[in-house]
């Protein structure tokens, strides 16, 4: 009988997924992207009084949850900072896009014409831009991919001369580079 009770308790715990010991994933600031779990007992926590100046150089054409993995990580970072009480005005993030990642900044129309589908990054780019993330694309990379900077780039993305200029410029302004 004790064995039957133990098996029943074990089965119940397995069926419920140990919900008493876990938290749900959430996307508190950038809805739908960069899911997080909040751990108030973690040793290192964001400083809600600090100013965060962060620079991402996005070159990879890799995906997580159907969007560019680096955009997804930016959303995660914003969600982590937000849930920890860091005010939006203290978060300054720049994403410089170049290399194989370049086509992700195309407008839906241009992307559809080139790849026969809508750009899966349009929604996350819009949400990050609305939050205040500066998303910039390297003009040299656009030229390499034959993407017209005047007609083919998402309206939420800024056109710049080159990532080779952008990155050191932001570093000289005190931005920390995330890899």
Image (cartoon, rainbow, N blue to C red):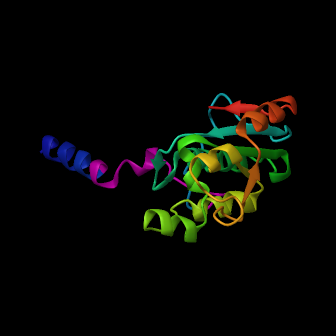
On the image, the x and y values in percent for residue 101 come to 55, 46
| 157 shown above or below 160 | below
Q: Quadrant of residue 99?
A: top right
Residue 20 in the magenta stretch? The answer is yes
Which residue is depicted at the point 63% across and 50% down? 142
Q: Is 28 placed left or right of 46 in the picture?
A: left
| 1 shown above or below 152 | above
Q: Is residue 61 visible?
A: yes
Which residue is depicted at the point 72% across and 49% down? 136
Residue 141 in the magenta stretch? The answer is no
Magenta stretch secondary structure, dominant: loop
| 169 shown above or below 141 | above
Q: Quadrant of the C terminus?
A: top right
Residues drawn in magenta: 13-31
Which one is in front, 39 or 80? 80
Which residue is depicted at the point 67% across and 66% down? 151
Which one is in front, 9 or 48? 48
Which one is in front, 35 or 17? 35
Which one is in front, 1 or 49? 49
Which residue is depicted at the point 54% across and 51% down? 35
Q: Quadrant of residue 115?
A: bottom left
Q: Is 83 placed left or right of 36 in the picture?
A: right
Q: Is residue 133 visible?
A: no
Residue at the bottom extreme, as displayed: 109
Q: Quadrant of the N terminus?
A: top left
On the image, the x and y values in percent for residue 33 come to 56, 56
């Amino acid at each position: 009988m004790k064995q039957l009770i133990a098996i029943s308790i074990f089965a119940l715990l397995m069926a419920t997924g140990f919900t008493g010991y876990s938290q749900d994933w959430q996307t508190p600031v950038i809805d739908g992207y960069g899911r997080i779990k909040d751990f108030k007992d973690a040793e290192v926590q964001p400083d809600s009084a600090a100013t965060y100046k962060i620079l991402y150089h996005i070159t990879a054409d890799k995906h997580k949850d159907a969007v560019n993995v680096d955009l997804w990580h930016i959303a995660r970072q914003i969600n982590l900072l937000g849930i920890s009480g860091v005010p939006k005005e203290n978060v300054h993030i720049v994403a410089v896009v170049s290399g194989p990642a370049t086509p992700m900044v195309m407008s839906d129309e241009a992307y559809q014409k080139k790849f026969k589908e809508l750009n899966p990054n349009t929604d996350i780019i819009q949400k990050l831009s609305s939050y205040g993330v500066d998303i910039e694309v390297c003009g040299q990379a656009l030229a390499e991919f034959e993407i017209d900077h005047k007609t083919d780039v998402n309206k939420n993305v800024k056109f710049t001369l080159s990532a080779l200029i952008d990155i050191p410029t932001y570093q000289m302004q005190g931005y920390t580079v995330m890899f």
